[in-house]
Each structure stands twice: as C-alpha cells, then as structure tokens.
Amino acid sequence: FERPFRATIAPPGSKSLTNRALVIAALADGDSTLSNILIADDTAVMLDGLKRLGYKLEIDPEASRVLVHWRSGRVPRRKVSLNCGNSGTTIRFLAALCALGKCVYRLDGNERMRERPIGELTDLLTALGANIAYEAKKGYPPIEVTASGLAGGKTRFPAAHSSQYLSAVLLAAPYAAEDVIIELEPNQTSWPYVAMTIELMRQFGVHTLVQLEHPGERPRELRVLRAPYKARDYAIEPDASSATYFMAAAAARPGASVTIPGLGQDSLQGDVGFGEVLEKMGAAMTRDDNSVTVEGAEKLRGIDVEMSDMPDAAMTLAALSVLAEGPTTIRGLHTLRVKETDRLSALQTELLKLGAETAIDGDTLRIDPPREVSPAEIDTYDDHRMA
C-alpha cells in the first residue's frame, strides 16, 4: 500500500455460524429468519441438502436472508442421497441430522471429501444409537445412514481430527430419546468452535450442562438436555476468519487502521482473537462491545505462537509472517492436514514461491521471511482459505 488507509469493513456472514444456524432453524419449533447469512459454496450445499431432505426454505440471496419453516425435530423426506461437495460442515452436520430421521440417507462429496476422515463422527453417532455403514473405504465418505432416531445416553469422545464431529452431534442431541452425555478426553481440537455451537444452541433455547474438572479449564463432560429449539430471528455475525485478512492488511502498513463492526466483546467466534496475535507482532488492537480495530505496526516482528484454537487464522498469520522481521513459528496445526486440501503442505509450497524458507515439524510450521518478497503465481488448490 503506497499510503496508509483507514477503513471500516464488514465481511460477509460467518460460514460456521450460517451452517450451524441453518441446522438449528430446520429443527426448531416455529419459523426462523436468518439474516446476513453467507452466500458461498459451503452454505449453498447446506441449503441444497436441507431442501433435498424436505425442509421448506425461502432464500433471498440479494438480501443474504433465509426463512426456514419449522419441522419440530423431524426429517421430512425419506431415502435421500446428498452430495456435500467439499463442505466438511455440511456432510458432518447433515450426517447427525439424518440420524434423527426414519429411513436411509446416503451422504457423499467430491474426490477430496472422500479423502477426509469421518470415522470419529460415525463412531460417536453409533454409540448414541445410529446405524451407519461405509460404502467404500472404512472411516471415509460415502456413508449410508439407516436412521430410526437417536437413542441418546452416555458416550466418550476422544481428542479428534475435527471439532466439527462434536458440534454435529451436539446440534442433533436435543432430539434424542434420552439426554446426551459426552465425556471429553483432554486436549480437544479447536475448542472455540464447540463453544460457539453450545452458545448458539442456547440462543435458540437449548441448554448444555458443562462440567469442569477445575475452574478455568476446558470441560470434561457435556450434557445436552432434551428440548426443542425455539424459532427466532437471528443475525449472523461477520465471518471472523475472513476479517483476519483485513486486520492483517492494516497490521502490515504503518499508520493504517481497519475497523470490523459486528465482532465485539461478545463475538461467538474464536478467530476474533487474531487481533491479540497481531498485537504480539507489534500492531495495536482495541475491541469494544460492537467492533474490533487493528492499527499498523511500525515494524512487524516474527513470533512463536500456538494456533490450534484458530487454525484458519493461522493461515493468515503464515502469509503475514513473510513481511515480518525474524522467523515465525506456528504450532498446533494438525487439523490443517484434513481440510479442503492439505493446507499445511500447501502453505509451505506457496510460501517458498515468495522467497521464504519454511520447515514443517509434525504440526508446527516455521517461516523465515525473505529479504525481499519474490513475485509469484499462487496456487489455491480449490480451497477458499488458501485463496
């Protein structure tokens, strides 16, 4: 940027919140209007999947709004085949939703989706009374759900590849025959996304009892009480992962600033914490009730940081680290291996094109910035976050 800029930018709605809210609204008792929904590939396949399952949706893409008519915990249609593309939230959330039905449902995706594990979700659903079979490779889509409702009860969940498995079961749990109790093994992946799910469920009237081992530590047990979701009008927050790009742009330019409205102190999204990461690099960050503001650093400095709680934002940090002084080490990136592409390997490949030196050690990425960035053509691997 030749000159400092001062901007206020509202990114589109959160993908994570949009797809969670769509499932909740479809199950709710009454009609819900969701505003500021994200219109994108991942939400389009979710909307299509819900329509194929028989849910009545009135979609207004120009206004980024959808009216979801109530079904009160029922799955309207039987014997449905769903193509979820490369949307992890869609195949995982709809697998749990289909388990509440009364027939056979097939869920599949594109070639990359068939390489992304789903076994830890199907194990969890099976423990709660679901009947799920693999069509080809065990532990991977396509899957067939022979549904007769979820029995519920008590089970245990490991520190899995994705927090979306746990979120998927939580979303469907209020309609199980019994309360769902899940014991959690330590070191749960991307916990802020599970916390987002629990809070969104609460805002639609369903409560999850959280048992802690010690105050301030992560939960050891979750208990979802049987109760219907209550329909409501709900405005989706701006996407905090997308906001990190504009926050990083401001951090990289001395004298620049960007304000993101809608991502204040009470944001449900863990990625809003990326502002604190930028502070460690030398930028300034302020957050009030309704917004977050980042101001540029005179010099960005490399940092050593754990990012397992916000893996999408870790990708923004990797790109920004090329402009910093000194190396950056990003830890806790194991989930990046099983996303729309192997994002850890892809990051390494593309950063090398820019002149950076990189090294991967397990789930840790180290980046040594170049003296001068080399112009390059960047491949994006058909992956929106890489883009």
Image (spheres, rainbow, N blue to C red):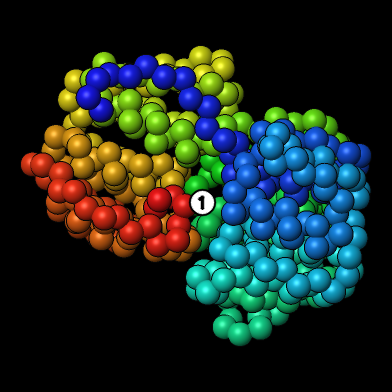
**Image side of residue 98 versus residue 11, left or right:** right
Q: Between residue 295 and residue 303, name the one nearer to us.
A: 295
Q: Position of residue 145 (x, y in %)?
A: 76, 73
Q: Position of residue 161 (x, y in %)?
A: 50, 61
Residue 42: name its quadrant. bottom right
Viewport quadrant of the N terminus: top left
Residue at 62% in and 41% down: 38
Residue at 47% in and 39% down: 241
Q: Position of residue 316 (x, y in %)?
A: 35, 42
Residue at 73% in and 58% down: 48
Q: Between residue 59 and residue 82, name the one nearer to us.
A: 59
For residue 262, above or below residue 227? above
For residue 174, above or below residue 66? below
Residue at the farthest left position = 371
Q: Position of residue 90 (x, y in %)?
A: 65, 58
Residue at 80% in and 35% down: 33
Judging from the image, what secondary structure is the residue with disc 1 in? Answer: loop
Residue at the farthest bottom position = 136
Q: Which residue is mark 1?
A: 188
For residue 223, above or below residue 139? above
Circle 1 packing at 10 Å, graded few (<14), some (14-19), many (20+), is many
Q: Can the viewer see residue 73 in this picture?
A: no
Q: Between residue 279 and residue 194, name the one nearer to us.
A: 279
Residue 129: name its quadrant. bottom right
Q: As shown in the figure, which amino acid type bears the numbered disc 1?
A: Gln
Residue 239: name its quadrant. top right
Question: How many marks on residues?
Answer: 1
For residue 265, above or below residue 332? above
**Image side of residue 373 versus residue 305, left or right:** left
Q: Can the viewer see residue 22 in this picture?
A: yes
